[in-house]
Amino acid sequence: MSAPSSDEAIRDASAREIVLRDIRLMGDSQAVDVRFTDGRIAAIGAAAVADAHPEARVIEAAGRIGLPGLVDLHTHLREPGREDTETIETGCQAAALGGFTAVHAMANTQPVADTAGVVEQVWRRGREVGLCDVIPVGAVTVGLSGERLAELGAMAESAARVRVFSDDGICVSDPLLMRRALEYVKAFDGVIAQHAQEPRLTLGAQMNEGELSGELGLTGWPAVAEEAIIARDVLLAEHVGSRLHVCHLSTRGSVEIIRWAKARGIDVTAEVTPHHLMLTEDLARTYDPLFKVNPPLRSADDVEAVRAGLADGTIDIVATDHAPHAHEDKDCEWSAGAFGMLGLQTAIGVVAATMVEPGNLTWAQVGDRMSFAPARIGRVADHGRPLEVGEPANLVIIDPDAPWEVRADRMASRSRNTPYVERTLPVSVWATFLRGRPTVMAGALSGALT
């Protein structure tokens, strides 16, 4: 084999080695230089530049904030089956633009991800796209029917190595079935992620139950429908000694139950969505289904409680519950509208607005809630890692001085159902790196790199 030409050597060095100049890791006040080599962090500090290849690619971060690549434990990518609303490719584009390097794809696809074959299909398609790592979530029950357990062990042993199981969108309401699922996943250190919604208390429910639902004439969705399932399930998790994760927690009472359970030593974790940190039930006054979501937007008191719970660590993570829907499923009357909102591209901006700017979280704590903790819960080995030498070069660079106005036509998702249209978020994602390779660079808000 002939030796590579000088041009080839330069291209190879540039592809293998990147130097980030003046980046504030974890929001630290002191900027440093960082070098990526062959997909890992090779040096931090003076050696990052001094020992770099002469043709390494140099990127001026100019004091922007560097966090470990974000990890979403709750994403709906819709493929297979509803590619008209989202595909793994468009969802990964949105994820990269939002600073995510790994997303967990929920199981409510068509067909349902309840077998080793389907989860492997999703996992392999994510690898083909290559913009972020797609980790499938397996269904708890066959067809999300709530009648018998799915092939949990086969999905865990598949190439996708599934560790998170959820019927999200539907509650595993049968307590015996939930107990069996919690017992089963102990064998491979899995976790059951529960959609906490007592179905008999939410028949026909359209929005948060309270004075406003009565005023608007919309069937109310009581907080106790969520809280009753969480209370039951933390006790079941304690009884069998298994891991439980609570999806999209939304009420003050739910926060208090999780706080009590953790104080008791129960192995439970919980997530809150960006929209439950920012938006309230008052938006139902518009009768615009853009603001219709499951669980529903709650009261201002509930929003205050979930912010406090996220700040003090009772709530472990922020998860987007990114839920794309076709135009006709949102451009209709409220009662006919689908539940769900886009979340991947806007998540970090909403967290900055609701948690960082008011002083509820530092940027280092954002790194914990949006990277370290979700990777730990999902047992994802190569994400949510410290920004240290030898670690995978999964990184998001956030520009704290670049607010951006959310526009539906700038969403990478195939759908446009963002609830933040015309809102200005205080920060933007400047760059995202997956194993040292840039998937998003400055000015690319309109599209991820391919």
Image: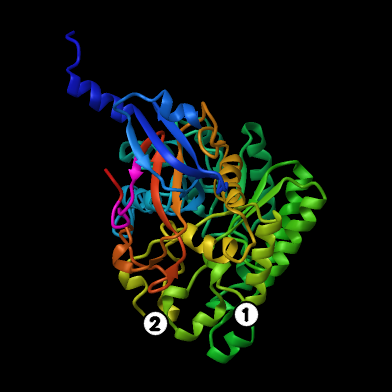
Q: Quadrant of the C terminus?
A: top left
Q: Is residue 295 above or below residue 377?
A: below
Report the front residue among 301 and 86: 301
Residue 350, image x and y in percent? 50, 63
> Which image quarter: residue 422?
bottom left
Q: Is residue 50 above or below residue 220?
A: above
Residue extending furthest toward the top: 1
Residue 69, image x and y in percent? 48, 43
Residue 400, image x and y in percent? 47, 57
Q: Is residue 321 above or below residue 236?
A: below
Query: Is 100 placed left or right of 191 in the picture?
Result: left
Near mark 2 (Cα within 10 A), the count class, few <14, some 14-19 or many ≥20, is: few
Q: What number is the disc on residue 333?
A: 2
Q: SS at mark 1?
A: loop
Q: What number is the disc on residue 209?
A: 1
Dominant SS type (magenta): loop
Asked whether 34 falls inside the magenta stretch, the response is no
At 41% from the left edge and 77% from the top edge, which residue is drawn? 336
